[in-house]
Amino acid sequence: MAGEGRQYLMLADRDDPVREALIDHSEDILRMKSCFSQAGYDVNAETLAAAWLSYSQGFAATWLGLPDDDRRLLRDLLEGQHPALVLSPTGKDCWPTSLVNSKDGHSHRVELPNELLAELGWETADVVEIARLPCGEIRLRKL
């Protein structure tokens, strides 16, 4: 393997239905992401997988096939008595930020906006886990 790029492995935890959906239904999730993006919504793949799992379970199914019509797909997840997706209280689900050099010169840090911290209920001393998801996205989770 000398000279080849490194390949990174991650734990294949099959007990997590969202992680399983991200792997097994990646094409559906990409279509949902595109559909929601074209409709003006910013939503990550993990949220879409969890939402469709929730919607499917309402019909006693693990993963329903997506409707052919994008308008129906939006309606299925956004409307009804108990919608699977709702707008973020701040009106957004994405906060731009930047990497900042740490004082030691050997690492970087990410500065999280105060608005996001307030919405999450996080404080300065909280411990946060950073995980890379199978779809390539990064997840921050308070421990």
Image: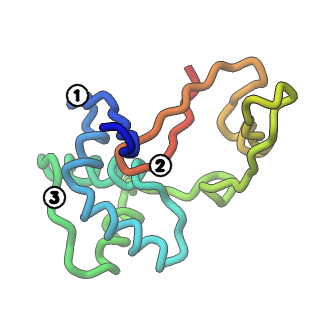
In this rendering, the answer to whether 13 lies above or below 77 is: above
Q: Nearer the viewer, mark 1 or mark 2?
A: 2
Circle nearer the N terminus (3, 2): 3
| Picture layout, residue 8 above or below residue 81 | above
Q: Secondary structure at mark 3?
A: loop
Where is residue 136? Give x, y as percent. Answer: 43, 49
Instruction: Tell me residue 121's x, y (percent).
Output: 69, 31
Mark 3 or mark 2, whichever is nearer to me? 2
Identity, as a three-letter code, of the amino acid under mark 2:
Glu
SS at circle 1: loop
Residue appearing at x 50%, y 56% in the figure: 86
Give the Cα separation between the discs numbered 1 and 2. Answer: 20 Å
Q: Residues within 10 Å of mark 3 (few under 14, many from 20)?
A: few
Q: Which residue is mark 3?
A: 64
Mark number, residue 15 = 1
Most distant residue in the front direction: 2
| Rendered image coloring scheme | rainbow
Mark on residue 137? 2
Task: Give the x, y percent position of residue 79.
Answer: 39, 66
Spatial distance from mark 3 to mark 2, Cα to Cα? 24 Å
* 10 Å crowding of disc 1: few (<14), some (14-19), many (20+): few
Dot 2 crowding, Cα within 10 Å, few <14, some 14–19, many 20+: few
* Distance between the alpha carbons at the discs numbered 3 and 1: 19 Å
Where residue 113 appears, x then y in whole percent?
78, 44
Q: Residue at x 29, y 76 (%)?
A: 72
Quadrant housing the C terminus: top right
| Three-letter amino acid code at the position of disc 3 | Leu
